[in-house]
Image (spheres, rainbow, N blue to C red):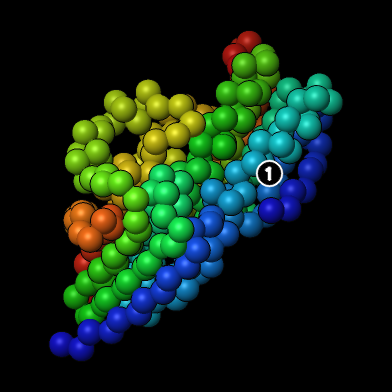
């Protein structure tokens, strides 16, 4: 099974998130083909993870690592800063929380709902968010 | 982000073009604030030209909804593209904000809410 990989590192600014998202959309198109819904779901989830890193991690740079084959696309969003486990935080959210929320706090819930696997690791003082979406092939 | 503004009777139809994302959220808020300063209170956000919206963009839509309805006005969104519609659906925002299929449906819903005295 051939696996493709791509990595990019950028300064932690929202403008750079926009550019990284554009590049990632191209990878999704190559991986998911006509399954545009899965591509859009993962693009949204990765965008949220990168936004969170810019806003909360206190890291000067963010690294995006992408690996894909015919079965799935896996994304690692890596940033420095204090430990924060988004998987535990997202697990606490439910429909009622969404209805009660005001202007913020939707990002983690979106990630949880839009990917097939959402994992977290803290290693070498870095937060590593792993998002996986399976292809429908 | 660019904005086109149209008037349909007393309703301001605000038509942004581009991506409603973290780097752009202030532009929507400031555009609506300018309309509010000019005493417009009926605002329809036509989202047909929004290709991508993230949770920060959604937060800005919720903020302007609150701003307009808090001032006794009526606010609605219309003509959402599929990806944007999904963000509304997953986060249940479509239960907090009036969402119409088309711009003309949105205009009708604003008039109906006005007739029934709802913000």
Asked whether the viewer can see residue B109, the reply is: no
Could you say which is closer to the camera, residue A50 or residue B18?
A: A50
- Residue positioned most to the bottom: A2
- Residue B64 rendering spot, x and y as whole percentages: 61, 30
Residue A73, above or below B52: below
The image shows residue A10, relative to residue A52, as above or below, that is below
Which image quadrant: the C terminus of chain B?
top right
| Residue B98 drawn at (x, y percent) | 53, 30
- How packed mark 1 is, by other alpha carbons closer than 10 Å (few <14, some 14-19, many 20 or more), is some
- The relative height of residue B85 versus residue B51 in the rendered view (above or below) is above
The residue at the point 19 percent across, 41 percent down is: A88
Residue at image location 57% in from the left, 37% down from the top: B60
Identity of the residue furthest to the left in this view: A1
Q: What residue is at 26 percent from the left and 77 percent from the top?
A: A68
Q: Name the residue under label 1.
A: B27
> Number of callouts in the render?
1
- Residue at image coords 42%, 49%: A58
Image coordinates for residue B4, horizontal then vertical, percent: 77, 48
Q: Residue furthest front?
A: A124
Quarter of the figure with residue B11: top right
Could you tell me if residue A128 is visible in this image?
yes
Asked which secondary structure carries label 1, the reply is helix
Residue A94 picture location, percent across and down? 25, 32
* Chain under callout 1: B
């Amino acid at each position: 099974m051939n696996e493709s990989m791509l990595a990019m590192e950028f300064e932690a600014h929202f403008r750079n998130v926009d550019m990284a998202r554009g590049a990632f959309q191209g990878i999704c198109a190559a991986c998911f083909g006509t399954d545009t819904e899965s591509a859009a779901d993962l693009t949204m989830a990765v965008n949220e993870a990168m936004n969170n890193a810019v806003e909360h991690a206190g890291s000067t740079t963010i690294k995006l690592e992408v690996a894909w084959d015919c079965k799935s696309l896996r994304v690692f969003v890596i940033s420095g800063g204090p430990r924060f486990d988004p998987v535990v935080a997202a697990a606490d959210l439910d429909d009622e929380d969404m209805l009660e929320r005001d202007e913020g706090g939707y990002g983690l819930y979106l990630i949880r709902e839009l990917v097939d696997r959402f994992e977290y690791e803290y290693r070498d003082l870095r937060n590593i968010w792993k998002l996986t979406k399976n292809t429908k092939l | 982000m660019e904005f086109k503004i149209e008037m349909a009777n007393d309703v301001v139809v605000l038509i942004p073009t581009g991506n409603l994302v973290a780097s752009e959220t202030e532009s929507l808020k400031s555009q609506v604030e300018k309309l509010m300063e000019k005493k417009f209170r009926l605002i329809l956000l036509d989202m047909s030209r929004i290709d991508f919206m993230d949770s920060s963009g959604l937060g800005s839509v919720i903020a302007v909804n609150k701003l307009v309805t808090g001032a006794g006005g009526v606010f609605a969104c219309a003509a959402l593209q599929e990806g944007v519609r999904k963000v509304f659906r997953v986060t249940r925002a479509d239960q907090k904000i009036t969402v119409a299929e088309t711009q003309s449906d949105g205009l009708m819903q604003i008039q109906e809410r006005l007739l029934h005295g709802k913000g």
